[in-house]
Image (cartoon, grey):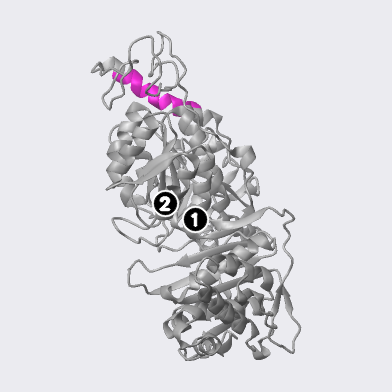
Amino acid sequence: MSTATASAPASAPASSAPAQALRNAVIRLAGNSQDGIQSIGGFLARLAGRTQHDVMTYMTIPSTISGGPSIFQLHLGSGHVLTAGDEADVLVAFYQHSYDSHISSLRAGGICIYESAEVTEFKTDRGIHHIGVPFTAATIEAIGGSARDRGKNMFVLGLLCAVYQLDKEKLAGIVTRQFGKKDESVLRNAMLAFDAGYAYPIGDMGTFNLEEGEHTDEHRISTDGNTIMTMGLIAAGVRYGSAYPITPWSSIMETLRSELPKYGGIYVQAEDELAAVSMTIGAAYAGHLAVTGSAGPGLSLKMEALSYASMAEIPLIVINVQRGGPSTGLPTSVEQSDLMQAIYGSHGDCPRIVLAPQDVEDCFYIALEAGRLAREYSCPVIILSDQALSSRIEAFTEPDLDKHWVEPTLDLSDRGEDFKPYPLDKVTHHAPPGTKLAGKYPHVTGLEHDEHGHPSGSPKMHTQMTEKRRNKLVELSKKLPLPEIYGEQEGDVLLIGWGSTYGPIKEAVNRLLAEGHKVGAAHIRHIHPMPAGLDRLWAKFKKVVVVEMNDYGLYGHGQLAMMLRAAYAEPKIQSVCKTDGLAFRIREIVTGVEKVMAAN
């Protein structure tokens, strides 16, 4: 054991007032990306999974290599947490620009803890309590001047641990595991700074006691969407693939590169996006479940090869972690503007399956479902995640791998003389290379083809094959379950969402119900094809409001709303959209819905 963790724990700062019991706490850390504020938030979020609390995080990071202003917001709760919080209870400001930009994010009566050497406070009429703390000077005093910039985030972590009376021993254990593999001096300095922050006197501010979490399951974890989606891919049987790095997809690729060799697989960083998807198609044709991925710009570059995969009916998974666009756009911000591209982006009639996870936990299960559907329907399956899901941390029950694990096997069983890879009356299932074939040798080509895969220019055959590729997804739509309605089952407004809007929409419904409105909400995970009979959901509602993070467009509706209006010719479908690169706040949805209700 390191000497840093063997030392006697520091005492909590003294306070004359008893600890105030809380069910929820929203903490916003504001500084620069080099200050390690993401590390502070990450440690606190991981602690939640070990103390039966719920957690949801939100962060912004600059898109420039040189760094810049950054925030990390953390919502800890004793009950179910659905959003990162509209307003912060506590703001920790490292610089004047952090203070100036984010003091408005504090609720009335909230607390601002700021670096006293950097920030000059100004008075507001909202009853905000200001507490100046010398983060840097106190860290230097604890561990010496050489590590001042590296240690002050750990000082703040210790300070917050004391303020909220969190489990110091468990939190110190998380820190130890994080730094334990590095030089002993790194861990020692981190713990010295942490202890100094924990023992720092906070004066009359008092402390808070976050109530015991309501979750009784001991097998809980806290992690981000990209990490748990990677675990879902491996559990689904993915062993091969290729990709090219791009924010915010890259961490999935890096994890697959390190993990797949442990399971007999391999993941390749290709020279570009087209090469990456082409390598993945090759692995899929060889009989393996394979995955490629990117963000919006990279998905565009993959489209030619994805058309090939649709024509050749090759099963593979494509992950698109959406970010702000168009072009390079907002590479570190969230948006849901790739929906139309995912469904219709390729040339020709090119049906593929499109899914969207609703929260971090669902990233695991959507990966499992994508693997199953790719195999069953022998076509590309696109998962539309987004930047918010990719980086935010949530706590949830650890998936049961024994229940969900798929051990991949190649089906090399003999095919008889009647084998056709593209039968008009059945779903395509290829014979991997090496399979013993008794009849005609099948071809795989991007040209239109007959049932054996041989190129065909027949107008009749093209019509039949186009119908075959379409109809298998029509049949899938009939098997998909309708989303459940949360809230009222009939009334004024039904909110429709997809992707990471799930939590804010549910909270908005709760608030609107409390205000006396008759509203409900349904969340769509199967974007294309959508479940048959969706119109039955809104038959008993006066209006339908689709909440999504993309533009209203030329015709006044977001992308999913456009699809629903086109599919059902339903004029009561309206939109609430935003494109500021930030996740929806509850009050933004409530305000948008109230405007729709007020309109004739």
Q: Residues within 10 Å of mark 1 (few under 14, many from 20)?
A: many
The main secondary structure of the magenta stretch is: helix
Which residue was labeled with disc 2?
Answer: 321
Location of residue 576 with respect to 118 vertically, above or below:
above
First-in-chain label (1 vs 2):
2
Q: Secondary structure at mark 2?
A: strand
**Location of residue 100 (image quadrant):** bottom left
Location of residue 496 with respect to 61 vertically, above or below:
above
Residue 426 x/y as whole percent = 45, 18
Task: Specify start and end residues of the magenta stretch as a single range.
Answer: 462-475
Amino acid type, callout 1: Leu
- Residue in the picture at 57% in, 88% down: 130
Residue 389 got which mark?
1
247 on left or right of 454:
right
Separation of marks 1 and 2 at Cα, in angstroms = 8 Å
Location of residue 455 with respect to 216 vertically, above or below:
above
